[in-house]
Amino acid sequence: MQTFPSQHPFATDYFRQLGNLSESFEATDKKSQPLSFSEAISQAAALVSQQSQQQKKVIFIGNGGSAAVASHQAIDYWRNGGFPAIAFNDGALLTCISNDFGYEQVFSKPIATFAQAGDIVFAISSSGNSANILAGASQANKMGCHVITLSAFKPENPLRQLGDINFFVPTMAYGFAEITHLCICHCILDGLMKGSLPETEVERVSDDSKLFSGSQPT
């Protein structure tokens, strides 16, 4: 098994690249006009807030690692944010639709059945070219849902043309694409929940110390 030398720069370089990547995020609107990243985050957050007040759902779809992001975020948006959120990742559901209708329809079929006009669909795909994600986003648009896309790899990928808000991460690495897509979703939710950046460990220790008189927390 290959091991890294103790001073191997891989880890440092990895996180440096990841940090640099965050400065290169792109966003566009439904007409493919550029948005600043902050503007896109604010618009996405406002959309989630406004539509949830109208009893609308938040739906997440993705394949593979993006499916894990979808399930993770559906739980967080519901449990932590209080928003009605779901992901269509049940194994029986996916295999039923794949067997009966074809894998390309594993998201468009549930969206056609369960989504309503005004719901929000987060369509997540590293390549932006997955047929079932494109079909799901297209079905959501037909039904009058609001679509937010997250993609990577090639800037001309077709998923970027299907959203009201489209986030694009300029990387060809699956790991970086999936990590940053997850972070973007978290950024939207954290902003809605707190309206400010999450506390760091140093800040928490500092705040906790105020609760102790003459002693420090262990």
Image: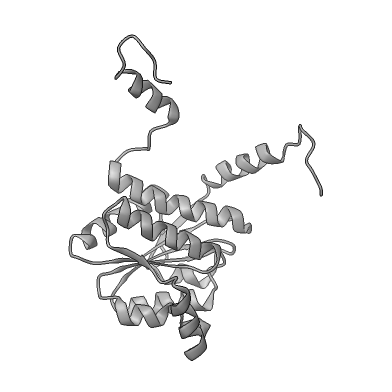
Query: Would you place residue 71 above or below residue 76 in this image?
Result: below
The residue depicted at 37 percent of the width and 21 percent of the height is: 206
Query: Would you place residue 179 above or below residue 30 in this image?
Result: above
Q: Is residue 98 visible?
A: yes
Q: Nearer the viewer, residue 31 or 215?
A: 215
Residue 117 x %, y %? 25, 75
Q: In which quarter of the image is residue 28?
A: bottom left
The residue depicted at 41 percent of the width and 80 percent of the height is: 108
The residue depicted at 40 percent of the width and 50 percent of the height is: 186
Residue 87 x %, y %? 39, 67
Q: How many labels does the image show?
A: 0
Q: Residue furthest top?
A: 214
**In the picture provided, is 120 more to the left or to the right than 34?**
left
**In the picture provided, is 204 more to the left or to the right than 194?**
right
In this figure, which colouring scheme has been used for the structure?
one colour
The residue depicted at 27 percent of the width and 62 percent of the height is: 84
Q: Residue furthest bottom?
A: 100
Q: Can residue 36 be seen in this view?
A: no
Residue 148 x %, y %? 38, 64
Q: Quadrant of residue 93?
A: bottom left
Q: Which residue lies furthest to the right in this view?
A: 1
Query: What is the quadrant of the C terminus in the image?
Result: top left
Query: Would you place residue 190 above or below residue 153 in this image?
Result: above
Residue 22 x %, y %? 52, 46
Q: Nearer the viewer, residue 203 or 127?
A: 203
Q: Which of 174 and 4 is in front in this view?
A: 4
Query: Would you place residue 101 above or below residue 8 in this image?
Result: below
